[in-house]
Amino acid sequence: MIFAYLDEFGHAGPFYGRNHDRFNTSPVFGLGGFLLPETAIRPFATKFLKLKTNLLQFEIEKSGKNAYEWEKKGSNLFTANSINRYPHIRAAMFRLLNDVRNSSGKVFYYGREKIRDTEDVRATGLYTTIFSHAIRQIEAYCESIDESFVLIVDEHSSRKELLETAAKTMFGHTPVRRLLSPPFEVESYLNQNIQAADWVATIISRLWNYKLDQDFANYADYEKYFWTRIHAVATHSTVMQRPKKPARIFAATRTEGALAAALQDALQKKGTAKIEAEYVRVKIDRRES
């Protein structure tokens, strides 16, 4: 049996751009984590607890809590600054990915690039759609190795909708037969494996932010350090990207007149250098006349 530990990556709300004053979090949303055989569940949790304790002992002691009831969110740990300046931080993720591989596990993620420049976004609808597709991708993996699986996710405000989505995916049209039950929700601060999934999901999020939006240029180190390592152990994982809009080569102004605007439209449709040259000639002629 396979246990799938999944956490969110990216953000389900609107996205206009990184420099927008409100909707600037992420161009992508998805679910990511890892898939482990049942025999690896307890040993993997123990390894992660030791890794977390050794890496963050000072913070754990300062909190006054036991290590097994304390968590550090991946988004706060694996910052662009920390992975660049502190080798032991990125080495912790290398170790975690090695532990997934050595446990006969797989990294897994499924996400989608979001529609940009609109506030008309149904966050719950996006979540349930991705949840359903993620289940089907894990089903395909489990079919290939002839195993059943269960899902473990962090607590979520849309619990009812997610359970309904899982039930529909299990018993509706083209049912998923390898999923044994609706997902189990757990308290992340008490579950070591879902904490580890959060760490992995953070790296996946930053990788795809960088890949999808040039304004995340300071995330280049995530690709340098983690892209190959993540995908060396990943299976059935993808982010669906949206077709890119053709770039506007130039913009006509009111002073350049209707002819320039018409030439601009023709250039966008045909994309020919000849029209662009004609536009430049018209501008020069108008200024000389």
Image: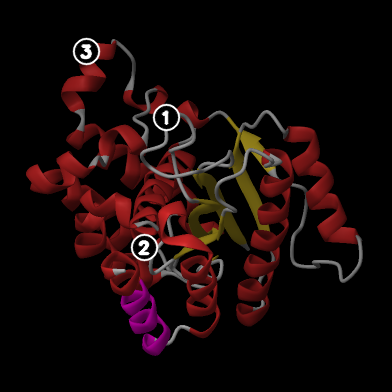
Q: Which residue is mark 1?
A: 21
Q: Nearer the viewer, mark 1 or mark 3?
A: 1
Q: Secondary structure at mark 2?
A: helix
Q: Secondary structure at mark 1?
A: loop
**Which segment did they paint magenta?**
273-282
The numbered mark at residue 208 is none
Q: Please indicate, yes or no, whether residue 241 appears anywhere in the rendered image.
A: yes
Residue drawn where x is 41% and y is 51% of the image: 205
Q: Which residue is mark 3?
A: 62
Question: Which quadrant holds residue 255?
Answer: bottom left
Q: Please indicate, yes or no, whether residue 238 appears anywhere in the rendered image.
A: no
- The answer to whether the residues at label 1 and label 3 have Cβ atoms under 8 Å apart is no
The numbered mark at residue 211 is 2
Q: Nearer the viewer, mark 2 or mark 3?
A: 2
Q: Name the main secondary structure of what is drawn in magenta.
A: helix
Q: Nearer the viewer, residue 194 or 274?
A: 274
Q: Is residue 7 above or below residue 67?
A: below
- In percent of width and height, residue 120 lies at 69, 41
- In percent of width and height, residue 186 lies at 60, 33
